[in-house]
Image: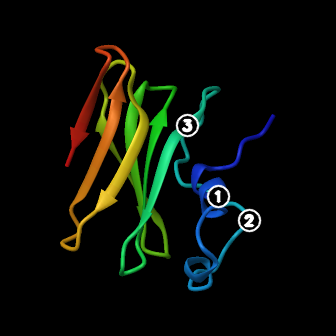
Amino acid sequence: MSRLMPYVVLMLWLPLSVLASYEVSVMEVVDATTSPYDVGEYSDIFIDPSGTIHISYYDDFNNSLKYASSDGIGWSTELVDDGNQVGKYSSIAVNSSGEKSIIYYDEDNTSLKYAG
């Protein structure tokens, strides 16, 4: 069974007024990790006022939290936390200065964590 990248599914929930300002594509690769595991689970999306798309998501292959952003031209990704079983159920926000805040679940320690 093939899976869609996380932001494709999440974009369906955006108001039409937000989608009208973006060119919507059917699918775009955000994280080119090739593995038999799911990359992109437990994701959240945030679009800042400048139009930059921010995504926090779980990488099941590495059991870690990742972050991706796009300025409309390309995607950049980074590892946020690579502890054991961290990064599920993430929520992301970006302030007016462009600083990101991510809240996520640490399954190994059964606690919430913050990355900023």
Label located before the other in sequence (3 or 2): 2
Residue 46 lies in what quarter of the image? bottom left
Indicate the position of residue 60 as horizontal and vertical percent values. 51, 27
Residue 53 image offset from top left, x and y in percent? 44, 67
Mark 1 Cα-neighbour bin, 10 Å: few <14, some 14–19, many ≥20: some
Q: Secondary structure at mark 2?
A: loop
- Is disc 3 placed on a helix, strand or loop? strand
Question: Pointer 2: what residue?
Answer: 26
Q: Are marks 1 and 2 in contact (CB under 8 Å)?
A: yes
Name the residue nearer the viewer: 109 or 40.
109
Image coordinates of residue 93 in percent, x first then y, are 32, 58
Q: Which color scheme is applied?
A: rainbow
- Judged by depth in the image, the label closer to the viewer, 3 or 1, is 1
Report the quarter where the N terminus lies.
top right
| Label 1 or label 2, whichever comes before in sequence order | 1
Residue under pointer 1? 8
Say what amino acid the circle numbered 3 marks. Val
**Amino acid type shown at disc 1:** Val
Local crowd at mark 3 within 10 Å, few (<14), some, or many (≥20)?
A: many
**From mark 3 to mark 2, how far is it between C-alphas?**
18 Å
